[in-house]
Amino acid sequence: MYANRARTYASLTLLCVIAGLSGCESTVYPPPPPDQALTQFDIPSDPKVIIFVIDGARRSETFADTSHAYIPHIWNDLRPQGTLLSSFHNQGITATVPGHSSMITGTWQNLANDGTERPTQPTIFEYYRKTHSVPQSDTYVVSGKSKLNVCSYGTDPLYGAAYGATEDVNYPDDHAVYDELMNVLQTDRPRLVLACFPSVDLAGHSSVWSSYTSAITAADSLAWKTWNYLQSDSFYTGQTYMFITNDHGRHNDANGGFTNHGDGCAGCRELMFLALGPDIWAGHSSDGYFTQRDICSTVGYLLDFPVPNSQGNLMPDIFTPVSTGIAEPFPDDGAAPPGEGTNTSRRKN
């Protein structure tokens, strides 16, 4: 589907300054160092993206837990293969529908959490299908929560249902979502999937700590199994990116504890994010500041489609740095560049 091309970060400082004038605050998204403009990212010829969302896992039980007792596969098996972002946030509404909608539109979405409102901006599925003229079966929303069918398309009149994703929702638990995800990957072979696993959030709302932590461990196992499948299937192996993240966290103990979520406390806002895939920096961790909005722009970059309404930025820290031969792109100590990059998702030849 795509020609094999190298991605070049060109004039990033200028672009970030321009983005800053339109709402990208420099205190939140610092411009990259000048030598970052020499970095290249190599993307495979037929890329695919799976966004694996563990609904409502609090960061204190995932990446911030020094024992990593509840995520043994993500921490011990998957993390060494990819890049962990240690400062990844939901700065919008910390609920299920707004959180998912912000990821796929690149904008903070103030939506009802009951599935009665669709995103007000185009989604990655609409951008992708309109740009590449691909069938609906190439894009999927697979979810345990039926209300997340609204993520298949937004209300922008230039896009809409004609470019929406396949809605495949209303499964009782994470295992059922995983089974359906495997079915979809093996039959329709989609290139862009939002997979939403509900059990952690449902268990958290039950107020039973052991059920909540057990659900995290189960989701951890399913993320590991999904990645292993992607590496074993000839259509996906070597071509597929998988982002493991959350739509929201849960209240920290000072704000009511794990049972609920929905405010601006750190427990609700701080999320996990692990990127896996070709040309993703293996065994790396970055403390650069990123948000859910940046998923939209990064997916657009990987799948070669513009995201004109997105307010997010490309996440350069997740990619393996490649020297152009002009100068070393990063310091000799191998540290990642700080902050976010450009908000363009268009490929550079």
Image (cartoon, grey):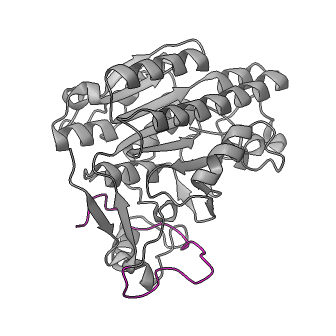
Q: Which x, y percent locates residue 317?
A: 51, 64
Q: Quadrant of the N terminus?
A: top left
In this rendering, position of residue 49 left or right of residue 332: left
**In this view of the protein, which residue sits in the foreground, 270 or 7?**
7
Residue at 47% in and 34% down: 232
In this rendering, position of residue 302 left or right of residue 30: left
Residue at 46% in and 80% down: 329
Residue at 71% in and 30% down: 216
Residue at 34% in and 52% down: 302
Q: Which x, y percent locates residue 277?
A: 47, 49
Q: Which x, y percent locates residue 303?
A: 30, 48
Q: Quadrant of the C terminus?
A: bottom left
Q: Which x, y percent locates residue 324?
A: 36, 80
- Asked if the magenta segment contains residue 344, the reply would be yes
**In this view of the protein, which residue sits in the foreground, 159 or 183?**
183
Using the rendered image of the protein, determine whether residue 117 is visible from the camera's viewpoint.
no
- Asked if the magenta segment contains residue 142, the reply would be no
Q: Residue furthest bottom?
A: 326
- The prevailing secondary structure element of the residues shown in magenta is loop
In this rendering, position of residue 343 left or right of residue 32: left
Using the rendered image of the protein, determine whether residue 245 is visible from the camera's viewpoint.
yes
Q: Quadrant of residue 268?
A: top right
**170 up-or-down from 194: above or below:** above
In this rendering, position of residue 89 left or right of residue 293: right
**In this view of the protein, which residue sits in the foreground, 334 or 157?**
334
Magenta span covers which residues?
Answer: 324-349
**41 up-or-down from 207: above or below:** below
Q: Quadrant of residue 72?
A: top right
> How many numbered marks does the figure carry?
0
